[in-house]
Image: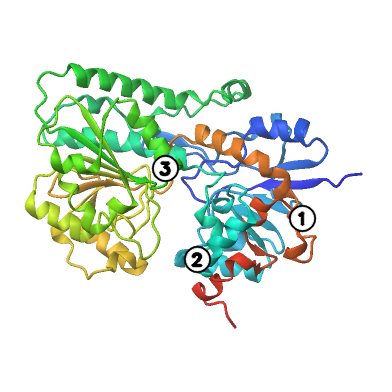
């Protein structure tokens, strides 16, 4: 008789996190058809009261316990019987169980300081850690070895390949909607009444109370109807922009970072989501050099420019900043990379043009990263103005976590649109604004790996003899509390050497 595996889905601990790794529709398929009698899935019971943020109900999960129960999952007060536990965001220290396998976005493979205590607790309790970010395409061992040599044990080789499980596209979709919504409010605050004021924040398009299992099953393959409401609004905006005869504000020029120099991979998942939204406006695409050479732009058109890595160095990007109205930042940033939207660049921009309208949607939300004055915010307070003249800190201060909150309070104003500075939105959990749709698509990608994840139940004594498919094995950072070979560099980053 074949072994039966038990997988648990934990209740998220972060108050505004409502996404799930697996949706009821896919669980129904997995346990009743695809892996019948091979796995059971246990859902940690919802026990947190409803929250209200900005007039909207935010449930602990975007799907109810009843929907999961109808799919065949077991609803339980705890997950003690499950050897493999799936989640979304970081887990509190007191919730780790000794010897269990945890699969979530751990934000540790770069050696992030803010999760050091969590990482050490997992080591102490001999846990296994699998990170969704590192589940990538099944590349050959030869390609992986080439990347290992290039990185020289300084970063996970899996981080350099295309992810197969991510929320990136939906982060891009929500980030683009919200940035255009904020652009409309900023223009209105400056006295320009524009079609963009028709747009709402993405969270206002979500239909929160569709708890029927029939709705879930019927909508699964086509996606969910929440996003379509935003699409309709964008179509109307485009029609009104074309017919607008008295437009007095400057042309809207949208810059999108994150284009790859590799012709076979133009945009990452985040960029694809952004492009999907911006394409609805039927923009005219320009090359970066057109911003410098072109003398006139049509006020009734929307323009878009894609920037690759070579064009987003601090020096190079400074040439394009004065021409941009909107920046949608989708670039992957690592410590040591250039910052196209550095404090220095923003200071220079506003010294020369104090009335400049610039709205930045920092979808990557890397505090101290490619957008240097970045602070993660949430949907209830989604934007702030950064006032460069008030930023008198030292070079590199924004990159230091302990100094960031002081810098933010001194140089930024939450919820403000007036002033000489860039309006920034940098929501840390963007897909939560359309959580059902985002979770459906994520679940659809994850379900192919469920049986492989179930097999990481800790029964194999050593990582080297663990028999699972390569993409999952490469995403294991810790096995029974020990760093796996591709992640040994974390010994130094987290000061683990004895």
Q: What's the residue at 37%, 50% (across, down)?
A: 331
Q: Residue lying furthest bottom in this view?
A: 498
Depicted 244 relative to depicted 406: above or below: above
In which quadrant will I find the N terminus?
Answer: top right
Q: Earlier in the sequence, mark 3 or mark 2?
A: 2
Quadrant housing residue 74: top right
Question: On the picture, is 33 further left or further right than 370?
Answer: right
Sequence-wise, the earlier of marks 1 and 3 is 3
Seen from the viewer's position, the closer of residues 19 and 468 is: 468
Residue hosting label 2? 151
Q: How is the image coloured?
A: rainbow
x%, y% of residue 137? 59, 47
Q: Is residue 312 left or right of residue 243?
A: right
The residue lying at 57 percent from left, 80 percent from top is: 497
Label drawn at residue 263: 3
Residue 432 in sight from this viewpoint: no
Mark 3: give few (<14), some (14-19) or many (20+) Cα within 10 Å.
Answer: few
**SS category of the residue bearing label 2:** helix
Location of mark 1 (residue): 467
Q: CA distance from mark 1 to mark 3?
A: 35 Å
Q: Secondary structure at mark 1?
A: loop
């Amino acid at each position: 008789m074949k072994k039966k595996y038990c997988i648990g889905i934990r209740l998220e601990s972060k108050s505004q996190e409502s996404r799930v790794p697996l949706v009821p529709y896919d669980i129904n398929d997995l346990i009743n058809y695809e892996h019948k009698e091979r796995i059971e899935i246990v859902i940690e019971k919802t026990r947190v009261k409803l929250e209200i943020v900005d007039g909207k109900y935010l449930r602990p999960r975007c799907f109810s316990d009843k929907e999961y129960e109808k799919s065949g999952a077991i609803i339980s007060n705890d997950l003690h019987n499950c050897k493999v536990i799936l989640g979304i965001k970081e887990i509190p220290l007191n919730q780790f169980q000794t010897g269990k396998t945890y699969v979530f976005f751990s934000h540790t493979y770069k050696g992030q300081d803010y999760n050091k205590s969590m990482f050490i607790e997992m080591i102490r309790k001999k846990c296994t850690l699998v990170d969704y970010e590192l589940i990538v395409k099944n590349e050959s061992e030869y390609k992986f070895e080439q990347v290992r040599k290039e990185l020289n044990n300084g970063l996970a080789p899996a981080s350099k390949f295309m992810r197969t499980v991510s929320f990136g596209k939906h982060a891009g979709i929500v980030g683009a909607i919200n940035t255009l919504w904020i652009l409309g409010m900023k223009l209105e605050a400056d006295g320009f009444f524009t079609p963009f004021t028709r747009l709402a924040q993405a969270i206002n398009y979500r239909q929160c109370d569709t708890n029927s299992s029939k709705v879930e099953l019927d909508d699964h393959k086509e996606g969910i109807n929440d996003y379509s409401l935003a699409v309709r609004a964008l179509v109307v905006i485009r029609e009104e922009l074309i017919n607008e005869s008295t437009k007095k504000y400057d042309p809207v020029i949208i810059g999108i970072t994150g284009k790859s120099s590799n012709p076979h991979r133009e945009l990452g998942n985040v960029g694809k989501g952004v492009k999907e939204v911006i394409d609805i406006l039927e923009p005219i695409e320009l090359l970066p050099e057109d911003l410098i050479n072109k003398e006139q732009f049509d006020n009734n058109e929307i323009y878009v420019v894609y920037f690759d890595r070579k064009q987003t160095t601090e020096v190079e990007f400074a040439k394009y900043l004065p021409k941009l109205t909107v920046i949608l930042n989708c670039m992957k940033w690592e410590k040591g990379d250039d910052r196209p939207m550095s404090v220095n660049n923003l200071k220079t921009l506003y010294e020369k043009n104090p009335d400049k309208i610039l709205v930045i949607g920092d979808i990557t939300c890397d505090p101290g990263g490619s957008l240097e004055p970045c602070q993660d915010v949430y949907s209830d307070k989604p934007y702030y103005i950064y006032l460069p003249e008030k930023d008198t800190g030292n070079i590199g201060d924004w990159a230091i976590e302990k100094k960031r909150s002081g810098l933010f309070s001194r140089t930024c104003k939450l919820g403000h649109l007036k002033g000489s500075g860039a309006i920034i939105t940098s929501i840390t959990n963007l897909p939560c604004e359309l959580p059902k749709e985002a979770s459906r698509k994520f679940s659809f990608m994850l379900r192919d790996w469920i049986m492989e994840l179930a097999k990481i139940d800790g029964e194999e004594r050593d990582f080297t003899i663990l028999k699972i498919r390569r993409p999952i094995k490469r995403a294991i950072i810790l096995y029974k509390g020990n760093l796996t070979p591709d992640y040994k560099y974390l010994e130094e980053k987290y000061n683990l050497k004895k």
